[in-house]
Image (cartoon, helix red, strand yellow):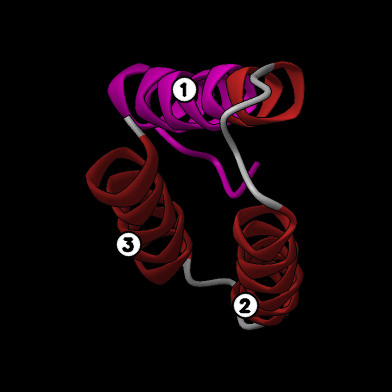
């Protein structure tokens, strides 16, 4: 991915794994409402669009920013 250094690659992997774990918890936790699930779905859809765009722009810094911002939003709202 873009010739990233090891620290950047590990950071992206950690963010992706964090996002995956939070998503799994949301799906497996009965306390989340349908509204919660729809909000997460919409945010993930926007995230995917942003990540695709920044990948096409060859901008790994902004890619990381968007991914980090999303994970932080998930933590702030659903942890």
Mark closest to the chain's N terminus, 2 or 1: 1
Locate residue 71, reporting x and y percent: 39, 44
Mark identifier at residue 9: none
User: Is 68 drawn above or below residue 12 in the view shown?
Assistant: below
Locate residue 18, reporting x and y percent: 47, 22
User: Is 49 drawn above or below residue 18 in the view shown?
Assistant: below
Q: Nearer the viewer, residue 34 or 3?
A: 34
Mark closest to the chain's N terminus, 3 or 2: 2
Q: CA distance from mark 3 to mark 2?
A: 10 Å
Q: Nearer the viewer, residue 24 or 11?
A: 24
- The magenta segment: 1-22
Residue under numbered circle 2: 50
Identify the secondary structure beneath mark 3: helix
Residue under numbered circle 1: 18
User: Is 63 drawn above or below residue 25 in the view shown?
Assistant: below
Q: Is 3 a magenta residue? A: yes
* Residue at the image point whose x is 32% and y is 60% from the top: 69
Which quadrant of the structure image shows residue 5?
A: top left
Locate residue 60, reporting x and y percent: 46, 59
Residue under numbered circle 3: 65
* Residue at the image point whose x is 65% and y is 49% from the top: 33
């Amino acid at each position: 991915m873009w010739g990233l250094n090891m620290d950047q690659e590990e950071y992206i992997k950690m963010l992706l794994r964090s996002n995956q774990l939070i998503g799994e918890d949301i799906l497996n936790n009965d306390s989340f409402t349908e509204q919660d699930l729809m909000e997460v779905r919409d945010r993930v859809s926007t995230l995917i669009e942003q990540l695709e765009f920044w990948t096409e722009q060859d901008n790994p810094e902004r890619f990381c920013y968007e991914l980090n911002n999303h994970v932080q939003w998930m933590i702030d709202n659903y942890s």
